[in-house]
Image (tube, rainbow, N blue to C red):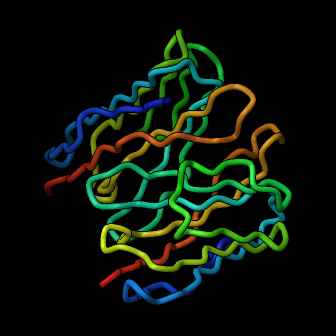
């Protein structure tokens, strides 16, 4: 079945450093979503990418969707303590709204 | 956020008990989802309902029984659970098929402990 892997599993950074998490799907996706889950909280939607090679920015966050629509990345510039949490990608294949979530990357930011 | 509510927030049950989890969405969405989130595991999709019809059952054991009486309410009936079923159960809703509205809005979850 479809699998979505993320690396790294954990990342500790000093405040102000950059952070990147990578998402890889075993199958071609129609679109990919990114979510953030704060400790003790629930996943909250960040963004959706649909087009091959698409790049979107939200302030310090940059999201990319691979040309083959099988991988994606989230890059945070100059991390802040408010960025702490687990970042999940979720991919869907064509004709379905069944999203398979990635394994997640837990980010810890040290002040 | 109060768009998707879940009750109870915490639940402790024995393996012989029967309990139900409730989810309600106030967003006018037509799809609702149950996910299981265990420690050190990715979010696992359990069930998907679209317009009250179950469209996905992700090989979930029969001790979990979903019910969707209308597009706003979703239940998960639990019976004879096992300790390994202890997890955070998350409900979500969305409006698939509407461009730009495929975002899933999650509820706060029910933290379940099976003894």
Residue B83 versus residue A96 in the image, above or below: below
| The furthest residue to the top | A67
**Relative side of A24 to A94, left or right:** left
Where residue A97 sits: x, y (%)? 69, 40
Where residue B58 sits: x, y (%)? 57, 48
Residue A110 versus residue A98 in the image, above or below: below
Q: How many marks?
A: 0
Question: Which of these two is toward me, A101 or A36?
Answer: A101
Question: Which of these two is toward me, B56 or B109?
Answer: B56
Quarter of the rendering occupied by the C terminus of chain A: bottom left
Question: Which of these two is toward me, A84 or A96?
Answer: A96
Name the residue located 76 percent from the left edge and 46 percent from the top edge: B101
Where residue B27 sits: x, y (%)? 78, 66
Where residue A11 sits: x, y (%)? 19, 43
Residue B80 versus residue B93 in the image, above or below: below
Name the residue located 25 percent from the left edge and 35 percent from the top edge: A18
Q: Quadrant of residue B15?
A: bottom left
**Relative side of B72 to B3, left or right:** right
Name the residue located 52 percent from the left edge and 66 percent from the top edge: B90
Residue A104 versus residue B66 in the image, above or below: above
Q: Quadrant of residue A56?
A: top right
Name the residue located 37 percent from the left edge and 62 percent from the top edge: A38
């Amino acid at each position: 079945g479809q699998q979505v892997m993320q690396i790294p599993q954990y990342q500790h950074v000093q405040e102000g450093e950059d952070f990147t998490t990578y998402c890889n799907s075993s199958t071609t996706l129609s679109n990919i979503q990114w979510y953030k889950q704060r400790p003790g909280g629930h996943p909250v939607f960040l963004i959706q990418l649909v087009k091959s090679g698409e790049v979107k920015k939200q302030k310090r966050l940059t999201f990319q969707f691979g040309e083959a629509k099988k991988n994606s990345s989230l890059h945070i510039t100059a991390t802040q303590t408010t960025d702490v949490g687990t970042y999940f990608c979720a991919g869907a294949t064509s004709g379905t709204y069944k999203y398979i979530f990635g394994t997640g990357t837990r980010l810890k930011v040290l002040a | 956020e109060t768009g998707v509510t879940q009750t109870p927030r915490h639940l402790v049950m024995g393996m012989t008990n029967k309990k139900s989890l409730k989810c309600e969405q106030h967003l006018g969405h037509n799809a609702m989802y149950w996910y299981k989130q265990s420690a050190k595991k990715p979010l696992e999709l359990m069930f998907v309902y679209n317009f009250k019809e179950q469209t996905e059952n992700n090989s979930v054991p029969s001790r979990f029984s979903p019910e969707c009486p209308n597009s706003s309410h979703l239940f998960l009936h639990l019976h004879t659970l096992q300790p390994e079923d202890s997890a955070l159960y998350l409900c979500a809703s969305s409006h698939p098929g509407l461009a730009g509205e495929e975002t899933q809005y999650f509820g706060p979850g029910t933290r379940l402990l099976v003894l």
